[in-house]
Image: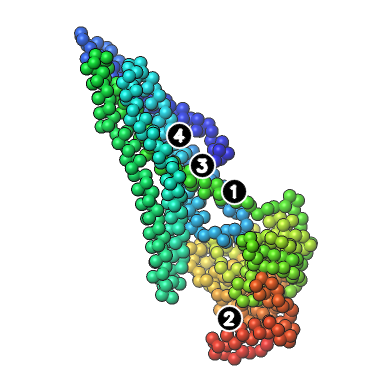
Amino acid sequence: MARLLRPYAWSFGAVVLLQVIGAVAGLAPLLAVVELGRTLLSTGPVDHGRVWTVVVVGAAGLLVRLLFTAASSGIGHVVDGQVQLALRRRLAARLGRVPIGWLSRRRTGELAKVVGDDVSAVHPFIAHAPGELVAAFVVPLVSLVYLFTVDWRLTLITLAPVLLAVALVPLMMTPARLREQKEFDAGMGRISNAAVEFAQGIAVVKAFGGAGRAHRRFRTAADEFTDAFLRWVRGMAPVAAGMQLALSPPFVLLVVLGGGAALITNGAMEPAGLLPFLLLGLGLTAPVAALGHGFDDLQAARRALGRIGDVLATPPLPEPAHPVEPRGHRVELRGVRFGYESGHEVLRGIDLVLEPGTVTAVVGPSGSGKSTLVQLLPRFFDPTHGSVVLGGADLREIGSRELYRTVSFVFQDVRLLRASVADNIALAVPHAGPDDVVRAARLANIHDRILQLPRGYASVIGEDAGLSGGEAQRVAIARALLADAPVLVLDEATAFADPQTEQAVRRALAALGGDRTVLVIAHRLETIADADTVVLLENGAVVERGAPAELLARDGRFAAFWKSHRSAVAGESGAPRGDEPR
């Protein structure tokens, strides 16, 4: 945070200086009332010239306070906007450089809270804290200097409420209170996650009668947050109430009047000497009370900065110091091992070669590591052991820009940007012309559907363009076709497509194939039949590989997997099983 705020040091200096002048000038009306009272209560004729001088000085002080504090607040809010913009830009830049696999394993609600709510929570720290801290120290300091010149004994009595309130502050920082604050923040995060998950999955849970369970999960998160909030309030309420009582005007006046009455009745002070303490005593406690009210906001800002710092401290995807360019697009996986958590490997010793001009299909039961395997090729993760080699170079030695010019990917879970359809297709090739975009859309069998949108290719996704899951997937396929990368990774990219569209896309990939290296997760039997090589994964290890016909002839694990899969499909559709792969 210090590095982030360093460019704004002069602005913060101006905020503090203006606030100091405004705070000191704000004492002028109070001191003017004191001097006016002394002048009017003094024996003898009233000095009218002095009276008007005091009035003018008080009014001028009030005007200076208004102008300077307004300027301080204005500059502080401008700096706050600049800092929040810088924070969001830094978060966006860091999230753009972290491994994509790290993002895929984080909940949307958590990251949305950091980028949105947590950055906004910094507002009190930037826009209000400098002025409030200055007022909390400068006003009491100047007031004390003046009051000590009047009567040091009553000054100490007037300080009693402030000292009592300050003595209660450590009770707000005990381990129990800090723990309750963390539980409060964690509860807020769970509510955000539950709300996002409920909103995203509402159609599914309602279709399968799970709305009650989804509601219960959200209610559970809300109930847990309520419990944490009540624990925090119960712990803080007595301390906060004590501070408010100590700093309240009635209590301060009671203390000052009690002490002043004792001194006056003993002849230790003139009655007129009580007036500055009655006025400045309240001014002495008001800034401290304001600081106490902002304590929760400052604590929330501190915790938010901690979470922002955690994201900014996430190690980015390591870039090579001296990037190398791949020679060709032959892909090799050499002794690859990988686990999301230490001690639990998802892939165990994968050795695999993907030759240019071939299609390699990865099959296997759920949980066998298929998706993890294909995510290594676009470097969503780095293997914990072994290496993934592209064109003779380890992926970790290839710059990310060059890597994503060489490797294109389409996954089953498609995400389109809130931009025009044309921009979504041309995402990897921003300089592509309209003819190239249309050609890719035709190959992906989505051109006619785009023309039906209100503004055709200029229609904006999420505004005037609503696409189904299969249509969004075809847009993603068109994007990959336009990119024309020599290595293509497909995670069942036609899963949501109808048979006609799937055939059209497969023909397009075949037509563009040439010496393209294709790695695909296969769930459909037709994909397996078209592949040059099939790799069967079980428990993160390759148990069989080869051409589909050869594997069937061996009558091994793949043959059993194939037969059970075809039987399941035939049973669901009632159709005959059809030809075996040749």
Q: What's the residue type where badge 3 is placed?
A: Val
Q: Give the foreground label among 1 and 3.
A: 1
Q: Give the foreground label among 2 and 1.
A: 1
User: Which residue, given by chain and number where applicable, does mark 4 sit on?
Assistant: 130
Q: Position of residue 497 (x, y in %)?
A: 56, 76
User: Is 539 left, or right, of 91 in this rendering?
Assistant: right
User: Is 100 left, or right, of 152 in this rendering?
Assistant: right
Q: What's the residue type where badge 1 is placed?
A: Ala
Nearest to N terminus: mark 1 or mark 3: 3
Nearest to N terminus: mark 2 or mark 4: 4
Most distant residue in the bottom direction:
576
Q: Position of residue 359 (x, y in %)?
A: 71, 74
Give the camera-side residue of 374 and 165.
165
Q: Secondary structure at mark 3?
A: helix
Q: What's the residue type where badge 4 is placed?
A: Pro
User: Which residue, given by chain and number where applicable, does mark 1 sit on?
Assistant: 313
Q: Residue at x 39, y 66 (%)?
A: 216
Q: Give the foreground label among 1 and 4.
A: 1
Q: Secondary structure at mark 4?
A: helix
